[in-house]
Amino acid sequence: MLFVGAVGAWMQGAVVLGALGGLVVEETPLARADVVIVMTNVPRVAAEAAVVVKAGYAPRVVVFPALPRPDDDVLRMLGIDAVLEHDIVVRVLRASGVPAQRIDLLPHAPDGTNEAAREIGRYARTHGMTRVIAITERSHTRRTARLLRRELPEHGVVMVRAAPHDEFDPDTWWQNRGNARELAMEALRWGNSFALRDWWHTTRPTTATHGATTVP
């Protein structure tokens, strides 16, 4: 009887923990959109964006430029070509069959998801877009969706999804050190995004352009 009770308690605890992991995840059924956004410069995210574009859900894909890295200067001093993260993303898109003329590079490198959402909001208003598909890491999906819905024009539609091979599993996150660490970090990101209102955000000049350039 004691054993049965222990098993029942363990199963109930697993259900609760799985529900906790699910709080940060949103997977939206796809429909026709104006653009697909690569929200983070990760190859598997870019590969999934290519799948979505090639499936006909949107005519274009948008990529953010990468922030400068502290070690880039060291590489340049040594004459080593520093490949930027967004260059790798563009290469993944091209290698996956997305033509260069359908890939746009935004003008600003965002410092965090809040700033990325603001940039997308500006881009959407400038180009008359109201429907977007955002591809990001699974633990970021629900926060990304909420931020984008806040920034898009009225009646805007946001769909989010993660790459199929994303490592974060909301149902078993407590069994993996990396997943547990990621969920803890995402909880802090929620606090920064919505409680602190992105305390460390970068203020863009009001005269800044919100266009995008097609990659060569």
Image (cartoon, grey):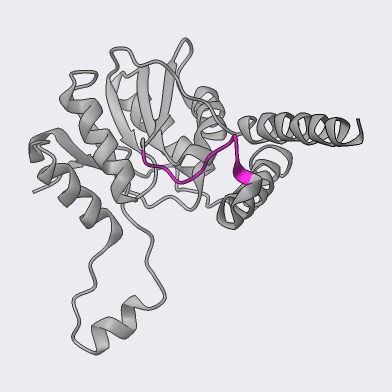
Name the quarter where the N terminus is drawn: top right
Q: Is residue 97 above or below residue 181?
A: above
Q: Is residue 51 left or right of residue 135?
A: left
Q: Which residue does the image show at 56% across and 27% down from the upper left?
A: 146
Q: Quadrant of residue 159?
A: top left
Tell me if I can see residue 165 in this picture: yes
Q: Which residue does the image show at 31% across and 52% down from the upper left?
A: 65
Q: Which residues are magenta?
A: 165-173
Q: Nearer the viewer, residue 127 or 38?
A: 38
Q: Is residue 69 left or right of residue 84?
A: right
171 is within the stretch colored magenta: yes
Q: Which residue does the image show at 27% across and 34% down from the upper left?
A: 49
Which residue extends farthest right? 2
Q: Is residue 148 above or below residue 188?
A: above
Q: Is residue 50 above or below residue 129?
A: below
Which residue extends farthest front? 1
Q: Nearer the viewer, residue 19 or 14?
A: 14
Which residue extends farthest top? 155
Q: Is residue 69 left or right of residue 184?
A: left
Q: Quadrant of residue 29?
A: top left
Q: Position of residue 56 (x, y in %)?
A: 18, 18
Q: Position of residue 26 (x, y in %)?
A: 52, 26
Q: Is residue 36 above or below residue 216?
A: above
Q: Total of numbered circles in the picture?
A: 0
Tell me if I can see residue 198 in this picture: no
Magenta span main SS = loop
188 is within the stretch colored magenta: no
